[in-house]
Amino acid sequence: MVGDPKWGGLARRAAGRLEEGGSGASSTWREVMAAAREEAERHGPTDRSIDEWVRVDEVRDEASNAVSRGRRPAADDRVELEDEVRVELNRSVGPTRAPRLEQRLADATRAFGAERYGDAARILRKLAEEAPRVAAVRELYGLTLYRQGKWRPAVKELEAFRMLTASTEQHPVLADCYRAQGDTATVDELWEELRSASPSAELVVEGRIVVAGSLADRGDLPGAIRVLEQGWRMPRRPRDHHLRRAYALADLYERAGDVARARELFGRLTAADPAFADVRTRLHGLN
């Protein structure tokens, strides 16, 4: 039976709260973006193999959205699971086994938040076997595999999450996994589902960026630009998802040879947040 369609991602429903400790982890996104740019310069957009795939978390701090960590966990941090997850675990495995699985899921959540994806995957693989109908387990395992670049097994877990919850919360990540495998039809299908669901603006932006990337992969730069231009304007006080969309659009303008528009948009990005990704370098390269 399909679960509650209002079930959110781990940020809001599944992974609970990390208690005090540590510094912010926003630099993770910028480091990934810088590495991605270097990779693109070496290989070019048409030479990128599956193993070299640049994830959608170039433009989405996936770990932040997935576990609502906000802070890098310290050694003594604890994870408290949300009540809904406890109920699901209890229903799935019974009250005797549930406490042990709760602790293991908390450990996996903490490992994911600390970017120890190998540790998280080892825990979650067994959890998914023992509690296959617990949406939080399948979601976090799918996201962990995604972060490891294991596209096919990530699809299996995220499709299970999708079936259990009827949620579009992880559609951008799922679409990016299909994109990495060259399944453009499913990328388009997931984008249409996401648009029809009318989720948050942030989630729609993530979907737009993935489908635009897929169109660009197919050589359709005008189509990719149209997806990101639709309804677009830079707010006076842009939030992170506005900046991510603007960056992706400016990059497409440059790739399409529209240097003037790329320069203008990178300039606006630099004015809005000069520390965002490599915007100052990109702008300098166009001047």
Image: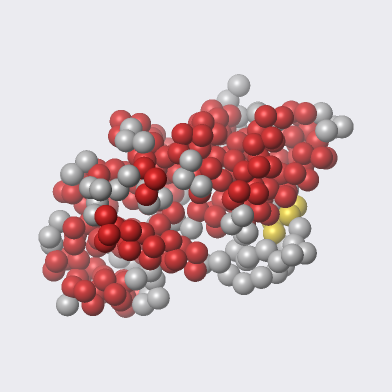
Q: How many marks?
A: 0
State left or right for residue 37 relative to residue 168.
Answer: left
Which residue lies most toward the top here?
Answer: 1
User: Which percent across, then down, holds residue 44?
Assistant: 24, 54
Residue 167 against residue 13 in the figure, above or below: above
What colour-coding does the image apply? secondary structure
Q: Residue 199: in sight, yes or no?
A: no
Q: Is residue 19 shown to the viewer in this render?
A: yes
> Percent position (x, y) of residue 13?
64, 46
Residue located at (41% from left, 50% from top): 55
Residue 205 point in image, percent of width and height: 37, 51
The residue shown at (60%, 21%) is: 1
Nearer-the-camera pick, 107 or 241: 107
The C terminus, quarter of image: bottom left
Placement of 68 over or under 165, stated as above or below: below
Nearest to the observer: residue 77 or residue 223: 77
In this view, 225 is above or below 94? below
Q: Residue at x 13, y 68 (%)?
A: 260
Identify the residue at horizontal 69%, vertical 36% (top origin): 127
Camera-side residue of 211 and 100: 100
Above or below residue 269? Residue 179 is: above
Left or right, residue 251 beside residue 143 = left
Q: Residue 236, image x and y in percent?
A: 34, 71
